[in-house]
């Protein structure tokens, strides 16, 4: 096992200034955390459901009282725009509230059988490991954590090395709200050390991972030795399909932020804009000024729509997809320090070009023409991924046909919304395994136990 560095420096991606230095968690400390979590979990699962629900609601209330503080921290460590960061902190509160409502509704079933009574119990798994990425540190941490706790589990959260600060603050707020010690622990550190120790620990029953498809597969393979439960939320290359019969003005006005939000570092980013040929020129004519008008700059300024990329590594990755002379449309970006990349649209790119096939995770979209509905569906599905997609049309029959035909977990019609805490979320194909959020979120953190009770005299 490689040596664990003792600390990790957290940079502000907008300024490259050091924001904090965070100690890393070694494999031995992970083991200690698992043992403590297991003890806390047993007591938590034995507590009255109403008390567990009350504590989670209290945690939500404490988060609500710290939305601004958490948001400012997210702006500093992740370069998110202030508006986005406030939404993200609020999302943590909402996830906790929603999960709290599930504690007393996590009901099993009574199934008709001969000779007795048959019931099912939904029992907690035990200790759950949540491995979060840097692109949405707070929401994604809470997607796993809130329902896992609500279902009676303990949670060990490993944030991304680049963005541990909001997670560490959330753990403090959990204690302030009265959650039992060791029930929710945050273990900052590197993926291949701290993360891997969680994956390989026999005391961790399930791993909830969000990140790259490559690491997701590695976690599934390593976890398989222990038959570890996994939920994987991986990459995407989502289509935004614009039919000629759509409200083209609206489709063009909303297309930019559908791939530029969070500087494109969004697994649901609509980065393949597919436009029906008869509307193609008009659409590009409208898209061009819309992309150029996006305000890129200081993420702590309320007017800013797009901030920097997370790191120099990410900046270099994104640059690799876009040689300088290639962009059809370029927006603006600040010079000087910070990991800035301008909004970029590519046209006339070959179907097998990496910019078309790979997840760039930056503010870059490709626009491709299609002929008819069949052609649109073929192009939309011409990807290894299957996370999200949007389609724009005024024809309701077409909207339903195309929604059914696109192999992706989250589709939106005449809108780009895809993630709500109350609706299920997850990927087809290489975009993942399992679902998060929605009415069944808690069930994913339980084992079903069937009990038959004889009524024979
Ligand atoms: P990543 O390596 O997959 O990181 C995601 C999380 O997994 C981080 O907490 C990471 O820790 C951890 N990790 C890494 N290797 C691990 C291992 N062997 N065992 C257990 N945990 C491990 O993603 P990335 O390197 O940050 O980003 C690379 C690309 O992945 C992006 O450009 C993007 O295409 C994609 N991505 C997708 C999403 C998404 O929402 N689907 C999110 C992030 C990235 P460290 O922080 O130490 O690496
Ligand atoms: Mg990594």
Image (spheres, grey):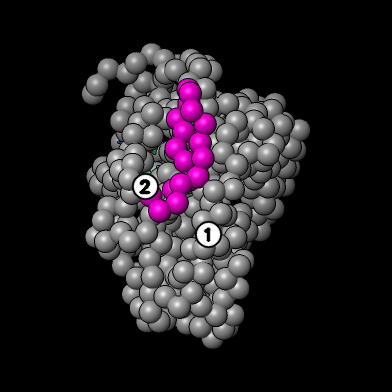
Q: Circle 2: is it few (<14), some (14-19), or many (20+) Cα within 10 Å?
A: many
Q: Where does label 1 land, which residue?
A: 287
For label 1, the SS is helix
Q: Is residue 340 magenta?
A: yes
The circle on residue 449 is none
Q: Is residue 281 above or below residue 425?
A: below
What segment is highlighted magenta in the picture? 327-344
Q: Secondary structure at mark 2?
A: loop
Which sits earlier in the primary sequence, circle 2 or circle 1? 1
- x then y, percent, for residue 388: 46, 61
Q: Quadrant of the C terminus?
A: bottom right
Residue 47 image-quadrant placement: top right
Direction from residue 291 to residue 376 in the image, left or right:
left
Task: Look at discs 2 and 1 and give the one toward the viewer.
Answer: 1
What is the CA distance from the residue labelled 2 to the residue labelled 1?
Answer: 20 Å
Horizontal and vertical percent position of residue 335: 48, 28
Q: Main secondary structure of the magenta part?
A: loop
Tell me which corner region of the image, top left, top right, bottom left or bottom right, holds residue 339. Answer: top left
Q: Nearer the viewer, residue 195 or 442?
A: 195
Q: Nearer the viewer, residue 16 or 322?
A: 322
Residue under label 2, please give it: 360
- Res. 186 visible in picture: no
Q: Is mark 2 within 8 Å of ligand 1?
A: yes
Q: Is residue 457 above or below residue 192?
A: below
Question: Residue at the location (36% across, 20% down)?
Answer: 26
Q: Residue at x 30, y 59 (%)?
A: 349
**Looking at the image, residue 322 lies above or below residue 173:** below
């Amino acid at each position: 096992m490689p040596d664990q560095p003792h600390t990790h420096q957290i940079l502000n991606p907008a300024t490259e200034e050091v924001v904090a230095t965070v100690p890393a968690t070694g494999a031995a400390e992970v083991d200690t955390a698992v043992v403590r979590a297991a003890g806390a979990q047993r007591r938590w699962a034995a507590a009255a459901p109403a008390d567990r629900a009350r504590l989670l609601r209290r945690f939500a209330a404490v988060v609500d009282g710290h939305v601004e503080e958490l948001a400012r921290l997210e702006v500093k460590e992740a370069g998110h725009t202030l508006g986005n960061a406030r939404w993200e902190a609020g999302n943590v509160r909402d996830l906790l509230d929603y999960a709290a409502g599930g504690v007393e509704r996590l009901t099993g079933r009574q199934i008709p059988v001969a000779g007795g009574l048959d019931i099912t119990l939904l029992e907690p798994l035990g200790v759950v490991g949540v491995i979060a990425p840097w692109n949405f540190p707070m929401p994604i941490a809470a997607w796993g954590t809130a329902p896992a706790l609500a279902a009676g589990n303990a949670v060990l959260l490993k944030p991304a090395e680049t963005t541990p600060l909001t997670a560490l603050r959330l753990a403090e707020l959990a204690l302030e709200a009265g959650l039992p010690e060791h029930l929710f622990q945050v273990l900052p550190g590197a993926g291949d050390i701290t993360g891997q120790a969680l994956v390989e620990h026999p005391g961790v029953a399930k791993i909830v991972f969000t990140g790259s498809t490559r690491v997701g597969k590695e976690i599934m393979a390593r976890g398989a030795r222990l038959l570890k439960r996994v939920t994987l939320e991986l990459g995407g290359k989502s289509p935004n399909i614009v039919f000629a019969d759509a409200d083209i003005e609206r489709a063009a006005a909303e297309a930019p932020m559908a791939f530029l939000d969070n500087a494109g570092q969004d697994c649901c980013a609509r980065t393949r804009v597919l436009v029906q040929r008869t509307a193609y020129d008009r659409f590009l004519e409208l898209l061009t000024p819309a992309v150029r008008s996006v305000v890129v700059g200081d993420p702590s300024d309320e007017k800013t729509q797009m901030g920097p990329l997370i790191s120099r590594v990410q900046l270099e990755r994104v640059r690799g997809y876009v040689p300088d002379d290639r962009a059809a449309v370029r927006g603006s970006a600040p010079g000087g320090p910070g990991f800035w990349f301008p909004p970029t649209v590519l046209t006339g790119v070959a179907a097998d070009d990496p910019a078309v096939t790979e997840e760039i995770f930056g503010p870059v979209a490709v626009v491709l023409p299609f002929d008819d509905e069949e052609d649109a569906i073929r192009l939309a599905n011409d990807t290894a991924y299957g996370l999200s997609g949007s389609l724009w049309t005024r024809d309701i029959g077409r909207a339903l046909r195309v929604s059914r035909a696109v192999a992706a977990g989250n589709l939106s019609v005449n809108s780009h919304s895809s993630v709500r805490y109350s609706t299920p979320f997850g990927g087809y194909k290489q975009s993942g395994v399992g679902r998060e959020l929605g009415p069944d979120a808690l069930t994913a953190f339980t084992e079903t136990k069937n009990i038959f009770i004889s009524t024979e005299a």
